[in-house]
Amino acid sequence: MALSRRLLLGRLAATGAAGAALAVGAGPARAAQPAHGGGRRVHTGFDRLAADGYRLLDGQKVGIVTNPTGVTPDLRHIVDVMHADDRVRLTAVFGPEHGFRGTAQAGGSEGRYDDPATGLPVYDTYNKSGQALADIFTASGVDTVVFDIQDVGARFYTYIWTLYDCMVAAVLAGKRFLVLDRPNPVTGRAATGPVLDKAYASFIGREPISQAHGMTVAELALLFNGEFVPQAAGRPVELETVRMTGWRRSDFYDTTRLPWVPPSPNMPTPDTALVYAGTCLFEGTNLSEGRGTTRPFELLGADGIDRHWAAAANELALPGVHFREAYFAPTFSKFQGKTIGGVQLHVHDRPAFDPVRTGIGLLVTAKRVWSGFAWRPDHGIDRLTGSATVRTMIDAGAGPDEIVAAWQQDLKRFRTVRRRYLRYP
């Protein structure tokens, strides 16, 4: 790791450690509640674990898979809190994509280092799976691996596959596994979108779940352990989960009274998460998905697109969303520094909004109105949607309703399986 990154991590982590040192013996359950909207106060899995005196971790050497979203309601990082508490023996941290302290951009990680604030060894899990990841768990010397990361509800967001890979590796290494739950920020309503075909499995989709899964990470862990981990590792992992209290399936994130910490650099707000399961599909095209702007995944566009795209998209009358003609100049990624045209999504009815149908509608209309439209040469769109069906149907001139209808049977089967693992009203 470069010296500049070490210095940055030291400054970031020292701030968290100072806050944790003031809270020794207090526990996050007794911290002052921040003002984050009205409604019910949601207590995360970590809140409940700490309030119970870390009983599930008694006598265990503990390693935790987490990132900057692993925070208490007053924004102390849980690693700093646990390290300062004599009731838990935290001995290792495992960093996913973007890193434990969050210094890496998309497709990057922080590597192996010692955390300057706590002195704990931080191991890099990004792009590691199977025996290679099991060897890391073994080398760390932990007895129990804990997972606590905020998800956003989309199959191609990599943290849920870090969860899956770590569960498989824990079986191979003979480790216990504990998942601390956090809200699905876009609700836990019915799953939507195409279900992955295993022939298209990758790190943005290991197993056949729907594009918007409508589950929490603890529910996904239960599903993975019941349906997929035994096939990959020979048996289920020794799994425990700590559920939230106060969360309902219909809750959007802003009703939870929890602070939002961006899970990755291009997921700045819960509004981003709301559209992401649909508009991330534009990563599989030559259009900008809004990276390098203040509204990633809400702004979409390309050089040569004008007002006609917004007009065509609005003609679809997609539920819960309007489209505005927009012009923007990304500061990095596609079309860096160039002013381009496109659309901005404005969701006006969140319960009615379907991000996946919306993403399909936008792909269909973009191809119709812009002659420069192209798929990424590596057919990344197939990995995002989970098969070649969406791409080939759009190329054949199919409309959004016809495309959505094509995945309904697979989706119905997944919903039946999913229902067995749901744990919230």
Image (cartoon, helix red, strand yellow):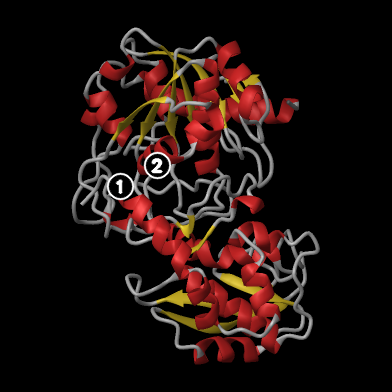
* Residue 17 visible at all: yes
- Foreground: 59 or 253? 59
Residue at the spot x=55%, y=37% of the render? 162
Image quadrant in which you'd find residue 377: bottom right
Answer above or below: position of 37 versus 84: below
Image x and y of residue 339, in percent:
73, 75
Q: Which residue is denoted by mark 1 in the rendering? A: 420
Q: In this view, does 306 lie to the left or right of 37?
A: right
Answer above or below: position of 384 versus 131: below
- Foreground: 305 or 225? 225
Q: Is residue 378 left or right of residue 213?
A: right
Q: Which amino acid does label 2 sit on?
A: Leu
* Contact flag, marks 2 and 1 (Cβ < 8 Å): yes
Within 10 Å of disc 1 (Cα), the crowding (few <14, some 14-19, many 20+) is: few
Image quadrant in which you'd find residue 80: top left
Image x and y of residue 134, in percent:
59, 21
* Residue 18 visible at all: no
Residue at the spot x=22%, y=25% of the render? 51
Q: Is residue 370 left or right of residue 281?
A: right
Tell me the tag on residue 15.
none
Which mark sits nearer the N-terminus, 2 or 1? Answer: 2
Q: Which residue reaches farthest top?
A: 59
Label 2's element?
helix
- Foreground: 237 or 321? 237
Q: Which amino acid does label 1 sit on?
A: Arg
Q: Which residue is denoted by mark 2 in the rendering? A: 223
Residue at the spot x=62%, y=87% of the render? 309
Image x and y of residue 109, in percent:
66, 35
Answer above or below: position of 145 versus 413: above
CA gap, disc 2 and disc 1: 8 Å
Task: Quadrant for the N terminus, please.
Answer: top right
